[in-house]
Image (spheres, rainbow, N blue to C red):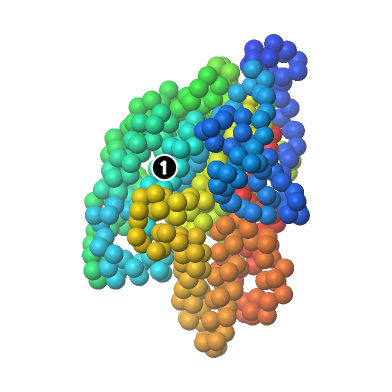
Amino acid sequence: MKRDKRKLVSGVFLAIMTAVLCSCSREANTPTEISETGSSAETVIIESFQEESESEIVIIPEQETGETFSEEETESESTETEEPEDRWQMRAIVGTDIHYLSRSLTDGGNVFQYMVEHGDGKVVTYIEQITDAFLEEVIRQKPDVLILSGDLTLDGEKKSHEELAEKLYEVEDAGIPVLVIPGNHDINNRHAAQYKGDERFPAEFTTPEEFREIYRDFGYDEAVSEDLISLSYVYELDDYNRLLMLDTCQYQKKALVGGAILVDTYDWIEQELEDAWDHGMNVIPVAHHNLLDESEIYVDDCTIEHGEQLVYILEDWDIPIFLSGHLHVQHTKRSDDNRGVWEMVTSSLATPACQYGNLIFRNDGSFSYWTKAVDVEQWAERHERTEEELLEFDKFKEPFLRRVFYNQSYDALQTISGLTVNQIDRMSRLYSELNYHYYQGTAYQIQDKVQEDPDYRLWMEDGSFTVLTDYVQYIVNDAKRDYNRVEGR
């Protein structure tokens, strides 16, 4: 019954804008057009965030994921389009998993550098500079909203939250609303630490009450509704769109990695979706954890526990898209073939390619999603920085991430008996390349090459590698397309 009501109100809502009721209703099961990989001549047209003109478009080559354009290139490839007077579109930038660390909590010493080089690929050494460059890009592009979907800090350090919040005021002062939700690292995290020389010390962590207070001006105080038992809320962006900001984290006693939604919060979600229907509003849900099983290897820690209930609710109300993070891997998936909810998992801003998501949502129910890497090099040049790794960040970031992944594999394979040093080195190099492309959402580009590599066969021939072997196999099987863009309806 709710699905029928939702269709009806969508038709009435659009009819008010177009004065033709029967021509505006949406079909829930309309197939989505996906940008598939093709020849270099194939393109996807998406509307840009260029502040010079509301009607500019940018042609993005299909094979050049995350490509950025100079002003001259943008102008030369732009064309003027005329939009109907009744047409609106919501434009959002999505950043996630910043993992910001206050500069006061590290001296860059040995224990800090070891954590960075043997971690999960976060460029914590330059996270302040990456964050500043990102926020300056947001301000220049002037989206309707900046969405930050959790893991705002490295490990929930209170000083990191406070310092990041101060930076976010610059975006708000530019007239761009900022909306945040917590991630599993942000609240009651007993791993909050500071790094001095060769030692790691505990740092003050952040309670749920402190999190809301620190970020009260970034969604909470302006919310039209707040859940009473979590840090979930609803933000009304304009006359047509609401953001359903879902707190999927478990931190009642201490921070847990996996995500879940409380039973009473599900009741609140249903009430909010019905209220949005009553007001003729579209709803875009945002969470830190994943709605769908985006990774078969990390289902328990990444997918919302019993998330099928949330999928059912969202499908029942014809919600078309869901935004999340947490995985650190760029990925997209739909809840059912040719129908259902599209989930866009934006990769971590802290992990190369250090990119963010862009979303355009239109009044006809269509949307465009694509990614863009932060231009750290331009930021460094503008601010007259002297660090070579910032001035040549594009040359630095890929080898950095590959080195981290190499270390992950090498450390793990050393525990396996029967492997020579040469085999461990070769296998780790292959793992590094494959995992690098997986994180970028571009593993399809090297799928055939990897499967023909003798070192891949070495990975597959010894089942004792357990999780790592399964992970390598999964990446190859999942390498179906470019996960950096979706054109949907």
Q: Position of residue 170 (x, y in %)?
A: 35, 36
- Under mark 1, the amino acid is Glu
Location of residue 259 with respect to 199 vertically, above or below? above
Q: Is residue 11 left or right of residue 200?
A: right
Give x and y (percent) for residue 392.
45, 61
The answer to which of 257 and 425 lies nearer the viewer is 425
- Tell me: residue 112, above or below residue 141: below
Q: Is residue 100 visible?
A: no
Q: Position of residue 347 (x, y in %)?
A: 52, 51
Observer-nearest of 242 and 437: 437
> Which residue, given by chain and number where applicable, does mark 1 sit on?
136
Q: Residue at x 33, y 35 (%)?
A: 169
Location of residue 235 in the rendering, given as x and y in whole percent from the top left corner: 45, 27
Name the quadrant containing residue 470.
Answer: bottom right
Residue under the image location 70 percent in, 71 percent down: 449
Q: Residue at x 43, y 37 (%)?
A: 139
Q: Is residue 78 left or right of residue 236?
A: right
The residue tagged with tag 1: helix, strand or loop? Answer: helix
Q: Is residue 223 above or below residue 190?
A: above
